[in-house]
Amino acid sequence: MKTGDQIVQELPWRWSVQGKIFIIGGLGYLFDAYDIALNGFLMPLLGAHFDLSLGGRGLVATANLVGMAVGAVAWGAVADRIGRKKAFSVTLLIFALFSVLGALAPTYPVFLALRFLAGVGLGGCIPVDYALVGEFSPRKYRGRVLTALDLWWPIGVTLCGLVSTAMLSLDGNWRWMLATMVLPALLLFWARRGIPESPIYLTKKGRETEARHVIDDLVARTGAPVEPYVIPEPVAETGPRGVASAAEQLRRIWKFSPRITSAAWLLFATVMLVYYAALSWLPSILKEEGLGETAAFMSTTLMSGVGIVGVLVSTALVDTVGRKWLIGVSAPVAALALVVFALVMKVPTGSAVAIAAFGFLMQLTIPAMYAYVSELYPTPLRASGFGWASSVSRVLTGFAPLLFGSVMWPVLGLPVTFALLGLAVLVAVVWMAVAAPETKGRALDGDDEELRVPAPRTVPEQAAI
């Protein structure tokens, strides 16, 4: 007899059912993209407003991305504890609160602190969104659905570029750029209240009545044939709570598979370092080359606009060529395109082509990587495994803007800097090729040795936090 998890993973795809979750989850991802892209547009404006050096401008992205790193770890662990739905909603509420306060910040240190706190809220969106959408998606379509989820990223970046460019003529433009994000975030928070809890998560937690209610409702609304199923007995969770929970999750994902976890962390860290370096600094680089603010902003918008096509192509290829091949080829070539940009950026046509090529190739890589890493871990570790990988990249990319603006760009020059980043990407994809399995067509919780998650360690109640 099938389990409830198998029933969910074998349902037909319906836009009115799983598609609704895909759209609402994707809109949260759009806000994440919008907020990170906004760092690049804010940096030259805040630099002029507060009279900042290049290194000081880099702190804009550093504060926000480090906050997202903290949020990715915290909310990944929280989502594995309290459920996807609750974490799904609260992350945006925290982001909206501190974003509107950031728009009112009187000084630069206060602004940085509020951008950090907004990042803590928004940093939880990606791991929670991917865990929830993945657990509602039929196995047959899961790769394409998780890859297509990344379509919201270049849409968010492009929208940020268009809105930010339109606001350049306003007094206090950087404040308006932050304030415009709050109302849509609150509306999305309201929409998220109608999303059901993940039935796969419920079964793992032993909440059989709730799980059966969700599964039966999904079967009815998708028109799938009704058949009996069982809900397996859950594994008792007696591990630490609160602050110790994140450390315990870290221990468990490394115990689960050091090879897989190291490959996931290295992929995230190197690929996202290259991408965020371009996203955060491209407007400033182009402005230093003599372009006006409008032209510099629109170049970043071109990169993200072409990236929309890249996501669509990645979605079409991910279940054909597999996750590993798509990542292994597109990531190093994308880094090479960035090196070419650095070499020809004084040639307007050449630099525009290189920027567009980078945007397209990087958006072949990132959607496949997100789908891939979310599939490498079993259900009890999926949100936290993804969250820790995302967190590593956010910590590294958080401090990278400061290092990029104060050391790498001024001392090494752009071509050498981007070449070193590209070499790191190449090392990451080579390790992925030998250390991690292909996940195309594999069950989320199969019988493969790689998917056998260790039981949580029993801890005396008085030791729990």
Image (cartoon, helix red, strand yellow):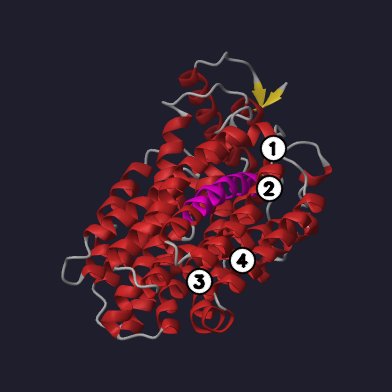
SS of the residue under disc 1: loop
Bin the neighbour count of mark 1 within 10 Å (Cα to Cα): few under 14, some 14-19, many 20 and up.
Answer: some
Q: Quadrant of residue 226?
A: top right
- Residue at point 29%, 67% (across, down): 293
Quadrant position of the C terminus in the picture = bottom right
Residue 223 placement (x, y as % from top left): 50, 15
Of 339 and 95, which appears nearest the observer? 339
Residue toward you, 463 or 69: 69
Q: Nearer the viewer, mark 2 or mark 4?
A: 2
Callout 3 secondary element: helix
Residue contact between numbered discs 4 and 3, judged by CB atoms under 8 Å: no
In this rendering, the answer to whether 287 lies above or below 449 is: below
Q: Residue at x 71, y 59 (%)?
A: 426
Q: Which residue is mark 2?
A: 329
- Mark 1 is on which residue type? Gly
Question: How far across and down, in percent of the image, does residue 68 sit?
Answer: 49, 65
Marks 2 and 3 sit apart, C-alpha to C-alpha, by 29 Å
